[in-house]
Image (cartoon, rainbow, N blue to C red):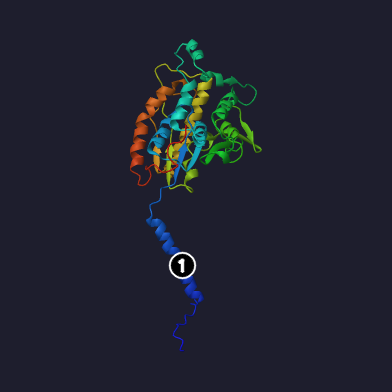
């Protein structure tokens, strides 16, 4: 009986044909990924500014309301404080409640404070630290932050975080993103001459505003869209206004940081830059929390409108809605 079956020989590709086939396959795969809508990777940079940094909180609330979860966060000074709270999983609303728990208007009767469970006055965190390289001790405040967050090491944060400090002797930027998180935050907010420097990894560290007041540049290589929140604010001297010696130190530091940022913005720009209109709020005037929140509302609304116009960004995604309270 004749064999009517068809003999099929296995195809053998030459080296040139194999390389051509592989290259075309990779190109098609890449084009396919490009055709599919991919959510931009979002970076959030939170700048320094003392009490003015409370304006970061309404901006976080705007992100939560839109269902936008940053992929990366960087923070300097108060930006590092707010950043670690948010990166730990606290929502903007929860952070606001935490702040309002103890930051009250000093015009209120002190006797009313003691009727609030677990309430604290902002002055409770300010202790003398003479002879330690600073006037005030931030340890109590750092302990408070430690009690508020579930993660105490960078690797345990829900969102990757980079904290910016500066090396005291050289002024060089130091980026902290591994190991214990609380000492990194304490270093980032150590305003020279006000809070003692922090020793970490063999370095003597001070406030990151000395080197990088708004670290949006640290997000460029990892993110498609960078949102930078500038809380440096503005100050117009009132008639007859005089500054104490500590006030001069605070104000001089803020001017230095603003000058660094202004020069930096001449050469580099984030995709979204937000600067709330914060007027005449000094570095330690945390009792003005509600005033800062109100002043930041127009910037929050503008940020919301801007983000809604970014394609594929403001749609709530599974697992990426507002951070849990």
Task: Tell me what residue is drawn at x 37 percent, y 47 percent.
Answer: 312
Task: Tell me what residue is drawn at x 44 percent, y 85 percent.
Answer: 4
Residue carrying label 1: 23
Look at the image and tell me whether residue 53 can be seen: no
Q: Is residue 293 left or right of residue 161?
A: left
| In the foreground, 155 or 293 | 155
Residue ranking furthest to the right: 202
**Number of numbered discs visible in the structure rendering:** 1
| In the foreground, 152 or 184 | 152
Please, what secondary structure does the residue beneath circle 1 have? helix
How packed mark 1 is, by other alpha carbons closer than 10 Å (few <14, some 14-19, many 20 or more), is: few
The percent coordinates of residue 308 (x first, y second) are: 34, 41
| In the foreground, 19 or 133 | 19
The percent coordinates of residue 203 (x first, y second) are: 64, 37
| In the foreground, 215 or 124 | 124
Task: Tell me what residue is drawn at x 47 percent, y 68 percent.
Answer: 22
Residue ranking furthest to the bottom: 1
The percent coordinates of residue 171 (x first, y second) are: 57, 37
The percent coordinates of residue 99 (x first, y second) are: 48, 25
Residue ranking furthest to the front: 1
Look at the image and tell me whether residue 162 can be seen: yes
**Quadrant of the rendered image containing residue 300:** top left
């Amino acid at each position: 009986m004749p064999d009517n079956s068809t003999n099929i020989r296995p195809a053998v590709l030459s080296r040139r044909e194999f390389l051509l086939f592989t290259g075309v396959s990779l190109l098609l795969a890449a084009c396919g990924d490009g055709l599919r809508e991919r959510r931009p990777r979002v970076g959030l940079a939170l700048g320094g500014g003392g009490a003015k940094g409370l304006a970061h909180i309404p901006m976080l609330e705007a992100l939560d309301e839109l269902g936008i979860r940053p992929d990366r966060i960087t923070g300097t000074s108060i930006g590092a404080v707010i950043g670690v709270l948010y990166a730990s999983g606290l929502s903007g609303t929860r952070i606001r409640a935490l702040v309002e728990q103890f930051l009250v208007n000093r015009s209120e009767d002190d006797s009313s404070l003691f009727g609030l469970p677990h309430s604290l006055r902002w002055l409770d965190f300010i202790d003398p630290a003479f002879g330690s390289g600073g006037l005030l001790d931030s340890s109590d405040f750092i302990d408070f932050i430690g009690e508020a967050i579930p993660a105490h090491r960078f690797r345990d944060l829900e969102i990757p975080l980079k904290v910016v400090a500066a090396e005291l002797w050289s002024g060089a930027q130091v980026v902290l993103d591994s190991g214990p998180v609380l000492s990194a935050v304490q270093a980032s907010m150590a305003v020279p001459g006000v809070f003692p420097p922090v020793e970490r990894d063999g370095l003597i560290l001070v406030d990151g505003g000395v080197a990088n007041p708004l670290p949006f540049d640290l997000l460029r290589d990892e993110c498609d869209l960078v949102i930078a929140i500038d809380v440096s604010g503005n100050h117009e001297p009132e008639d007859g206004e005089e500054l104490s010696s500590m006030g001069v130190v605070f104000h001089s530091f803020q001017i230095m940081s603003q000058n660094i940022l202004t020069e930096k913005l001449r050469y580099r720009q984030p995709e979204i830059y937000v600067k709330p209109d914060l007027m005449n709020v000094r570095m330690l005037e945390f009792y003005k929390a509600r005033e800062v929140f109100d002043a930041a509302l127009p910037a929050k609304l503008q940020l919301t409108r801007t983000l809604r116009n970014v394609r594929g960004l403001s749609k709530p995604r599974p697992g990426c809605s507002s951070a849990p309270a």
